[in-house]
Image (tube, grey):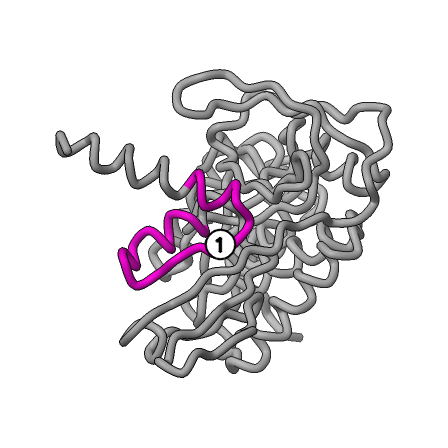
Amino acid sequence: MLKVNVSSLRVLQMLQLLFEKDYTMNELMAALSEVSKERCSNFLVSKYINTCRFCGIDIQKINGKYTLLKLPFGIEFSDDVLSLFDDIRKYSSELRLGKNIRAYNSLLSKINKRSDRYYSKIETPEDDKNIQSFEFAIENTLKINLNYIEKGKSILILCDPLELTSEGRKLAIIINYNGERKKILYQDVISIAASNIKSSGSILSTSVIFKLHNQLARRYTIRPDEKVVGIEDDGSITVLNKTEDKQSLLNRLLKYDTLCEIVSPKVYKKEMKQLIDDTLANYGK
């Protein structure tokens, strides 16, 4: 008869639980006791967690819950597969398929624990009421009442929720406000509440046209959401950008200095000028 090391079995059972979701210590004790049909104490579960850590399995306590972040072995995904992941996210977002987005984020979370290449930078807290309200509004095509901090001030607006995304490794939301696509870091969000007002049901975006000159025009890499709509005799190119949120785009174009010129819309040209003036003011010019 095959002998089974009970402690090893419990470690594997605990890993299987943590692979599916995060647990507080009490929740993990109860879940592991139910799976193993034996009482698992705080002492035993802590011992199993430390055993995993010793073996290079990254388990951390985040917001009071034990979270499996990374396994020391994994699957190598090709660039084509990673591109497919991004297409799925993009299409789910554009079609406003709330349930699909949640399922997709859950899939990516599991992939990240098994992959040699970290893909998704979005960590979505499952029990966060603001996130739940945001996704509920997307799923039911409703506007949201959004309260957030901007330049140290509290702003309250009624807007269309578009998608959850990231800025670096920080969670962010994308909304549509007055026909303008806007990205807001989740750390700046005070509250999100679904309204009873139907949203447009489609993602509105502002098409931005800018011109690049000289060596920048020659070395510039066109992004997936951009296309070249004009080439001048002197080598300058005119680029159309449809999906990047305003602040990110303006901050990016500002780095190109005099080699970049916003053509339209006028409101973007005006805000770019204000951004330049504010920057110069910081240096007393």
Is residue 257 positioned above or below 34 on the image?
Answer: below
Which corner quadrant of the image does residue 215 belong to? bottom left
Residue at image location 77% in from the left, 41% down from the top: 138
Q: Which residue is mark 1?
A: 121
**The N terminus appears in which quarter of the rendering?**
bottom right
Q: Is residue 239 left or right of residue 202?
A: left
Residue type at the position of mark 1:
Lys
Along the viewing direction, whichever of 109 and 223 lies nearer the viewer: 223
Is residue 190 positioned above or below 176 on the image?
Answer: above
Q: For the magenta stretch, what is the residue range? A: 249-271
Along the viewing direction, whichever of 205 and 4 lies nearer the viewer: 205
Q: Main secondary structure of the magenta part?
A: helix
Residue at image location 65% in from the left, 35% down from the top: 177
Residue at image location 55% in from the left, 33% down from the top: 24
Magenta-drawn stretch contains 268: yes
Magenta-drawn stretch contains 277: no
